[in-house]
Image (cartoon, grey):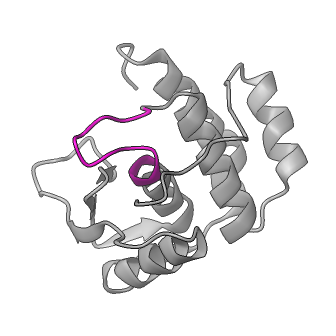
Amino acid sequence: MSSRDAAADRLYAWEDQVVAPQDRSRVPFAQLQALVDHVWAGEGLKWPPRVRPLAHQARATVARASRLAIEAPAELPSWVLLHEIAHALTSDIDGRSAGHGPDFVGTYLRLLVRYSKMDQLLLETTLRQAGIAYRLDVRLPPSS
């Protein structure tokens, strides 16, 4: 973990302790775009980001996302895919992003509850215990 982004470090530790043990499913690359499309449509949006292979030299990165693309390896835990979709949802076409801040975490929380059927109260309680801020009232842009 990087000390450059303390919010990301706290979130990654929370994911390892709370999220990963609840969802051990893995998605092969060939199915990632269909899941991205499903979540995007489920959020009432058009034009989902395109899934493309993660560069082989990106050894320290599990996956990466922007509004336009999600880069992933040959297989990805489904909760990591939701993490990346939350990044895409909280980024704009010009590259501005919510990072790992409260808007991102609130969006990610909503996706975990809706698509992985995780317990919202448990997630909120453990986020607060970990000192991770989140906003549940995040509005997605209508043209995303």
Q: Decide whether residue 108 is among the magenta residues.
A: no
What residue is at 64 percent from the left and 59 percent from the top? 111
What residue is at 60 percent from the left and 29 percent from the top? 102
Q: Which residues are magenta?
A: 87-98
Residue 71 position in % (x across, y down): 25, 60
The answer to which of 82 and 54 lies nearer the viewer is: 82
Q: Quadrant of residue 103?
A: top right
The answer to which of 111 and 63 lies nearer the viewer is: 111
Q: Give the position of the C terminus as an image quadrant.
A: bottom left
Residue 142 position in % (x across, y down): 49, 59
Q: Is residue 44 above or below residue 91?
A: below
Q: Quadrant of residue 50?
A: bottom left
Q: Give the position of the N terminus as an image quadrant.
A: top left
Count of number-bearing discs: 0
Look at the image and tell me whether residue 92 can be seen: yes
Look at the image and tell me whether residue 27 can be seen: no
The answer to which of 27 and 44 lies nearer the viewer is: 44
What residue is at 72 percent from the left and 66 percent from the top? 114
Q: Quadrant of residue 61?
A: top left
What residue is at 24 percent from the left and 40 percent from the top? 95
Q: Decide whether residue 97 is among the magenta residues.
A: yes
Residue 78 position in % (x across, y down): 53, 67
Q: Main secondary structure of the magenta part?
A: loop
Position of residue 23 in the picture relative to residue 119 (left or right)? left
Position of residue 101 in the picture relative to residue 125 (left or right)? left
Residue 64 position in % (x across, y down): 30, 50
Q: Is residue 95 above or below residue 75?
A: above
